[in-house]
Amino acid sequence: MCGIIGILKKENSELSDNLVQSLIDLEYRGYDSAGIAIVHNSSIKIEKCLGAPSQYMDLDRFKKNIGEEKILTTVGIGHNRWATHGKPSISNAHPHLDCGGDIAVVHNGTILNYESLKENLKKQGHNFKSDTDTEVVPHLIEENMKKGLSLEDAIVESASLLEGSFGLAIIHKDYPKTLFVLKNGSPISIGISNEMFVVASSTNAILRYTDRYLVLEDGEMAKLDAENMSHNIFKYKQPARSRLYKAEQVIEGILLEDLSKGDFDTFMQKEIFEQPATTRSTILGRTNTEEGLAVLGGLIDYKEKLRNIDNLYIVGCGTAYNAGMLGKELIENLTPINVSAQIASEFRYRKQNFSPDNSVFLSISQSGETADTLESLKEMKRKGFTTLGIVNVVGSAIAHESDAGIYTRAGTEIGVASTKAFTAQAITLYLFSLSLARVHGMSESSGISFIKELESIPDIMKKVLENHQEIERIAEVFRDIEKIQFLGRGIHMPIAYEGALKFKELTYMEAGSYPLGELKHGPMAVIDDMSLSVVILPKDDLFSIGSISIEQIKSKSGRLLVITDEEGAKSPVMRLADEIIVIPKLNNPVMYPLIEVLPLQLFAYYFAKQLGNNIDKPRNLAKSVTVQ
Ligand code: F6R
């Protein structure tokens, strides 16, 4: 949610090109507007655009305005915006300036006390040009410099007044060799090479230049100096500002090719088709087939705790919550453990009744940054719970804060609508469930067959994806529908929720999701010949009861798309379906969710494509939701 970039180089170069490329690498974090600022001939030069920088940033115009074919400089900052304070507009796009136009700031996060700061600054004569919370920062620095403070002191003094969350990158027209960075609650990493520093909200935007980086912790500020390529990191609230020495880290788990679409039309399409490979990678080295065990190295120190728990909280948002619901179904199916799967933004504010003595808290997150999930985790830590995480982004805040965890190894996910991260979360939960089940009564032979079935999933996923043209055709068949709902029972219910979430994110149409049996208690009212019910119904022990709902939908003239397996497709009730998507038959029905989600991802994808929507960047959304 918002992406910031800052580049400082030893030598002059055409930095604006680098800044824009980095903004494109970070575009998934926000894309309603963007901007860059550089120090050029002792003044700040700014270029902004409304919409995604890959489409709308006009560097030729920038060069023309400055009057140079090549704009050479050593320092610059940039920002992709996901609007929170003030609508998307050029004036609200970052970077923001002080009155004199000397200081430029980009910000990721929310400054909670900006209104009172703004009021005071206005009284002191400052002129504001945007509706953003961010704009107080350059004006505060300006005000403090007016009082005679140095730039560094003025930044420190200003930061001490800010409440809320921020990642900030700051430049000044008179300091072409200096870049300041601050972190409090929003992620910031500093890439380091012999010639440059690259500051970014995510290591995705650093990898293009270097794989060496430092992580800033909350309350820290860095002064980066290109004169001698040095950095000074300190706690900005501690008067002594003692220098902190940090070990350099190496970027892992991201490949540069993850940042490109390759031969695919969109990142989402690429990520859907990557799922057989990512699933394989999530499982790799984590099973002991001879003994039917899951081998989860990250949880090794918590083996005893997990052996003795009676309860488990699983918490996440959006797709991660849907994976959590699936985890609940699985774990309650395979073990005697009670599982409460909850939405993080609700969980934080609710009374929780499980005790830390016999319970564990598990959060799920692709980005590892989601504010509601992170705050739930912190709260449960304060309450004395053991906290585990299922996280995709290595070294992210949730990974860092959790006592232990399992990485999902889905690779970088750029498409805003989550696909491969969901299946990686699900697979991880299957492994986690197996590890719990084996210490709670599951036999060795059941463990062995569970693993065999799990390891066969990547090949089966491949088969499901081969059906993509048929799913594209079906999306066309239902093009004229006015309403849609996704329905599934038991272990298929979370997949119905995930199918609906994908569909609404991409098509901008409201999509209901219900447990199939709930249909008759209200949702049935919306059914008519312009409504589509997507029913997930493979042949398992709930098939017969689910078939009744199919009859009910048809009796109300509703249109019907059924996702079933080869066995289910032979059932006479299927004659009622307008269309059927057939998935392979599985020996262990508990595994169906892992493959039935793929046609739903494709269905949403093709439906949105025919509407001409922006698939990778659906309107109003962003990838990492770091605001509450
Ligand atoms: C849906 C989607 C969102 C995220 C949610 C949590 O396609 O991407 O619903 O799943 O914002 O994000 P993470 O997993 O990063 O915590």
Image (tube, rainbow, N blue to C red):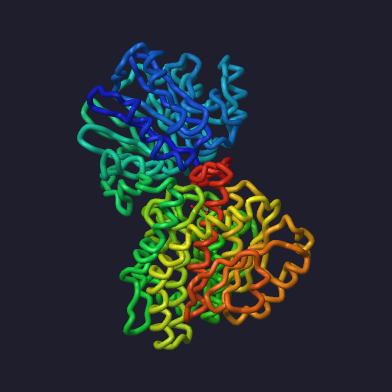
* Residue depicted at 42% across the width and 54% down the height: 271
Where residue 606 sits: x, y (%)?
Answer: 53, 52
Q: Is residue 538 left or right of residue 283?
A: right
* Residue depicted at 52% across the width and 28% down the height: 50
Where residue 166 sits: x, y (%)?
Answer: 48, 38
Q: Is residue 396 above or below residue 236?
A: below
State whether residue 317 appears in this view. Answer: no
Q: In this view, does 355 lie above or below 146?
A: below
Closer to us: 393 or 128: 393
Answer with the quarter of the image where residue 65 lies.
top left
State whether residue 255 appears in this view. Answer: yes
Closer to us: 91 or 440: 91
Closer to us: 305 or 581: 581
Q: Is residue 403 above or below residue 549?
A: above
Where residue 592 sits: x, y (%)?
Answer: 51, 72
Answer with the quarter of the image where residue 246 lies.
top left
* Residue depicted at 48% across the width and 77% down the height: 586
- Tally the numbered discs: 0
